[in-house]
Structures are given as C-alpha cells and as structure tokens.
Amino acid sequence: MANTARNGQTWHAMMAAPAHDEMARQMFVQSMFKMVEDDLVPATRKLWTASAEPRFKQAKGRAAQDANEVRKALMQEPYVQTWSSIRRTLKEMQYDAVGPMVERQLPALIDRARALRDSSRKLGSLTLHPDVAVPRYMAEVDIHAKPGSFHTDLTEDDVFAGAEFDRTFYIIYNGAMGPLGEDMGASVAAWTRANHPNLQPRRILDIGCTVGHGTLGWVDAFPDAEVYAIDTGAPCLHYAHARAETLGRKVHFSLQDGEHTKFPDGYFDIVTSHILLHELPRPAIKAIFAESHRLLCKGGLMLHQDGSNYHALPPIDGFFSDWYTHYNNEPFQSGAHTLDKMGTAAAAGFDKAKTFEAFAPSQRPGAKSSYYMVGAQR
Ligand SMILES: C[S@@+](CC[C@H](N)C(=O)[O-])C[C@H]1O[C@@H](n2cnc3c(N)ncnc32)[C@H](O)[C@@H]1O
C-alpha cells in the first residue's frame, strides 16, 4: 500500500526500505543539497555582478559572451570553488547513502519484481529484446556520477540501478518532481490536453523512461491510452515494470534504443521524453527526432522535455546550467543545450512551421515552475 510516510516520497512495495541510520544519511544529503541549491549557488549571482563581472569587463574591455567565459572567470573564486566541490561531493554521497541500502535488500527486491513480472494478473508487460545494445555514449560514462550508470547489471534480473535511482532522484530534487517523480510527465500531459484538446491519444511512447517517473504522469492523464516506455538500461526496466505494477499502473516497458525502435511506422499519437536529450550526443538527438517522426501518425505530437537552451539565457544562467557538463559527468549537456532543436526537428522530417518550443506549467500544487520542451506536430 503506497503512503507518504518517508520524507514525502510515495512509498511502494518495490522500494528498498531504509533503516534508521540509512534514513538519517539520506536526509542529511537531501538537506545539504537543499542548502547548496537554495543558498550557496544563488549567492554566486551577487558575487558575479558585484565583483567578478566588473573585473572581467576591465580585463577584456567587454562583457562576457557565453557560459564558458563566465565559468572560467567564476571558477577562480574560492567561494565558487567551495560550493562546486561540496555539490560534486554530495552528488557522489547520494549514491553512497542509497546504494548500500538497496544492496542489502537486493535479493528480496529481485524476487518481488520477478513475481510481478510472472504474475498472470499483471496489468502491463516487460519485454527485453536480447539484440538491443547499450549505446556507447551511455556505456562509457557513469552518467551524473551514478556508479554503473543506468544499464549495469551484476546479477540475473537485477533491479539495483532502478531501485537506487528511484530514491536518489527524490533526494536530489528534494521532492520537487512530485511524490512519485511524476510531475514532468503530468505537466507535459496537462499542457497537451490544454493545447491540443482534440487529440485523443490511443498510444503514447516515453523514450528513456528509466524507472517510469515521467511515464506514470502520462498514464494518469490519459487513462484510455496505451502507454509504452522504452530504455536501454535493463535493470531500470525490471524495476520500472515492477514499480508500475505495484502502484496499479499499466505500462508496456521494453528494452529498446530510441534511435531505432522496433515499433511500426505511425504507431503512436504522442512520442515524448523527459530529461533525456541532455544526456545524448547530437547525432543521437537527431536520430531520436527522426525516429519520433517515423513513429508518429498524422497529427501526432513529438514532445521532448528537458532544460532550455543556453542561448536563450543570460551567460550567468548558462554557467549554472552548464556546471553539470564540466563537474557532474554529463559530457553531452552543453552540446544538447546549444543545439538548434527546432531546426533539428525540421531536418528530421517535420514541417518547420509545425515545430515549436513551449513551457508546460508544473502540476504540483503551489509550484510556480514550468518545464521547457521542444515539439513538433506530424
Ligand atoms: C535522466 S534519465 C531519464 C529520466 C526519466 N525519463 C524519468 O522520468 O525519470 C535518461 C535515461 O535515458 C536512457 N537512454 C539513454 N539513451 C537512450 C536511447 N538511445 N534509447 C533509450 N533510452 C536511452 C538511459 O538509460 C536513462 O535511463
């Protein structure tokens, strides 16, 4: 039975349960993150305008032009070096605080996931195509310092990478993505309902679903649609399927590469993704847009949600966003966030006049934020 007893996150039967000291460590990391994000990082803005920017202007005779120039100037400042180092350390500590807890309960979690997968009463499905390879850009980097990234499995039917992500995702965002991490999907789905009221999707595809955080937002928003979710990380999918089942949500999960899936042409009314693009090199983004175009029926919508492009931001904000490229093992972020995404959608086959960028207001009660997305209509 799901509840919200643990620190605001909706609890369910697939989650590894923390013992007292494990919970204390996780709460420490979460609170420390909150302090870094709410206090230390924003104060950098003041430091930039009060001293670092005037010094830059004096030295160069002009204003800083991009995030790179701001980074090179600000990383000389002991204040910025300090929070940057604390933030990176916390990124690693989140895995240290959650990983051993999951490992301790791993055999029981795997058994639970197997039982849900093999149940004759299951709602959705899990398909692991044996010929699907993990793309090199995923296999060779521990993305955002997550040990083993999303795909490493150490035992048969492993769920470790998924179980760990479900908890660290909540800790790192301090619950800002909702009690089930569903807010990205719920918000883009609500935007779709409001802006395309005549679209009655029969099938929806979520690419790079990990454990299905965003996916569940779509399931709840469009209960009559069949929802499919794919990823190249098998241990995340094992967990995602079991998580959805235990939460009573029907999703068809499969191990597939979003660059070239096994679905037929025109199979979907909506193809979406959540915080996927920034983890991909540009050729992969282009391939996923082309695949989205192939998979959509006439009138269908492509909606890829992620951070907005640096060029739309003042250079100091570009620096904050770009920090992850340089210090959080997300090497493709700056390439993704400087790509002309509407132009890329047009090159992938969409009519340029039907490409767009938009912001979906968060559906979390009281939230004032919104989610950037690039989209196109087929
Ligand atoms: C940051 S996570 C996305 C988070 C997720 N959408 C959510 O709602 O929490 C990126 C995911 O994309 C997956 N991925 C990366 N490249 C992929 C590809 N070519 N096809 C499918 N999935 C991919 C990774 O394995 C990882 O699970």
Image (tube, rainbow, N blue to C red):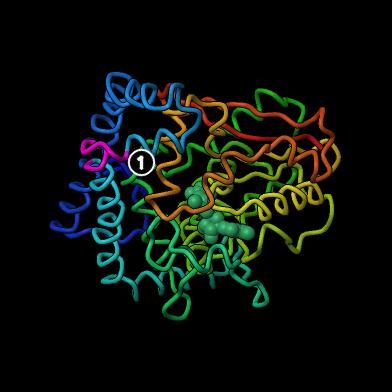
Region of the chain picked out in magenta, as a range: 75-82
Ligand 1 is found in which quarter of the picture?
bottom right
Q: Which amino acid does label 1 sit on?
A: Tyr
Element under disc 1 = loop
In the rendered structure, the answer to whether residue 301 lies left or right of residue 76 reads right
- Is disc 1 surrounded by few (<14), some (14 to 19) or many (20+) residues within 10 Å? some
52 over 25 or under it: above or below: above
Is residue 212 visible to us here? Answer: no
Quadrant of the image occupied by residue 35: top left
145 over 369 or under it: above or below: below
Is residue 76 visible to us here? Answer: yes
- Mark 1 and ligand 1: say if the CB distance to the nearest ligand atom is below 8 Å: no
In the rendered structure, the answer to whether residue 312 lies left or right of residue 148 reads right
In the rendered structure, the answer to whether residue 46 lies left or right of residue 350 reads left
Give the x, y percent position of residue 28: 18, 47
159 over 80 or under it: above or below: below
Name the foreground residue: 205 vs 276.
276
Q: Does the magenta stretch include residue 81?
A: yes
Q: Does the magenta stretch include residue 371?
A: no
Give the x, y percent position of residue 250: 58, 53
- Predominant SS along the magenta part: helix
Give the x, y percent position of residue 301: 74, 37
Give the x, y percent position of residue 114: 47, 73
Query: Residue shown at 20%/47% (left/top)?
Result: 27
Q: Name the residue under label 1.
A: 173
In the rendered structure, the answer to whether residue 139 lies left or right of residue 199 reads left
Quadrant of the snapshot with the C terminus: top right
Query: Residue shown at 80%/38% (left/top)?
Result: 346
Name the foreground residue: 177 vs 152.
152
